[in-house]
Image (tube, rainbow, N blue to C red):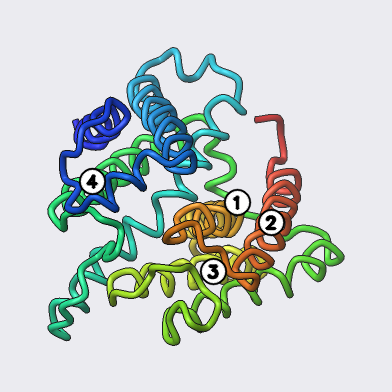
Amino acid sequence: MSCLPYLIFKVAWLSGSTIGITSAEGAATMNDPRHLVGNYLTVAMDLLAIGLAVVLPRPISHRLPAWLVLVPAWGATGLLAPIVLGLPVGLLVQLVTGTDVPVGSGDGLAGWVFVIIYGGFGVLGCCLAVLVLLHAMDRWGHIFTSGPRPPRPAVSAICAVPLLGYGLALLIWAIAGPEAGGPAGFESPAQRTVLAVTGLLVAIGYATPLARGFVARHPRWAVGATWAGCSVATLSGPTFVALSHDGVVRIPLLIAAVVSAVAGLLYSIALLRVTSSRPL
């Protein structure tokens, strides 16, 4: 049910409706090629998330190839974790500070649209997290018993600078704003908090497998932190590029997005290979 508002809005906009759009500029923007492609793509992704939520609780999910479960779940985590963890905190910060910059300002959409859509994202993210975790613990319990293992030192060294550098850049952009080269349009405290939380997730995803004491004491938490951080490291950069207001992509963000995506994917694959002591 949490996916329905998002689907309704997207289908309506693709059909030419102006529901939730507050200006003629916003209506024109919604019909430009970038937004049309994005709307079709996000509808497909939402339908995939619905399919994943429907299949995971059923016995048939254990007969599916591992990649058919892990790839969509990994992608959903990378896209939704910053929203689920960052947006509630950001909205609280914005409420406490009394800042009147609305979330999503400048996009030509009413504030209530963001409340409905991102509220649905939050519910969807929480539901998928529970379903994926229960499925993974039942199907691959040995990984949750031992925790993630660090990749080869060479891989850790190669990925250290791009991943930790990207995490630091996100924290700087959260403080300094878009003028420092970050995502265009991320101006409100809520949006900047999402940037900060994203940076922390990236750093945690990289560092957790290397913290052997923590992994030994809390293997399940370590698996979750590594999974979330690595997926966010890989997908958040391209997502910020795609969401940049008016399609304005600054060079620092573009470089960080490409480098972090490559490093995040490399680190994720290396971790998966060494952590899986037996076939998935």
Residue topped by disc 1: 146
Real-space Cα separation, disc 3 to disc 2, in angstroms: 14 Å
> Considering only vertical position in the picture, is 95 above or below 78?
below
Q: Position of residue 100 (x, y in %)?
A: 15, 78
Q: Nearer the viewer, mark 4 or mark 3?
A: 4
- Is residue 130 or residue 73 the one in the foreground? 73
For label 3, the residue is 204
Q: Where is residue 216, by image quadrant?
A: bottom right
Circle 3 crowding by C-alpha within 10 Å: few under 14, some 14–19, many from 20: many
Question: Along the line of sight, which residue is nearer the eye, 146 or 192?
Answer: 192
Find residue 265 and report its horizontal and vertical position in percent.
69, 50
Dot 1, how many residues are within 10 Å of its Cα: few (below 14), some (14-19), or many (20+)?
A: some
Query: Disc 1 or 4, which lies upstream in sequence?
Result: 4
Report which residue position mark 4 lands on. Answer: 117
Please identify the quarter of the rendering in which residue 84 is found.
bottom left
List the residue tagged with mark 2: 149
- Judging from the image, what secondary structure is the residue with disc 3 in? helix
The CA span between labels 2 and 4 is 37 Å
Q: Amino acid at mark 3?
A: Ile
Residue 119 in the image: above or below residue 252: above
Query: What amino acid type is highlighted by mark number 1?
Result: Ser
Identity, as a three-letter code, of the amino acid under mark 2: Arg
Q: Is residue 94 left or right of residue 164?
A: left
Marks 1/2 in contact by CB < 8 Å: the verdict is yes
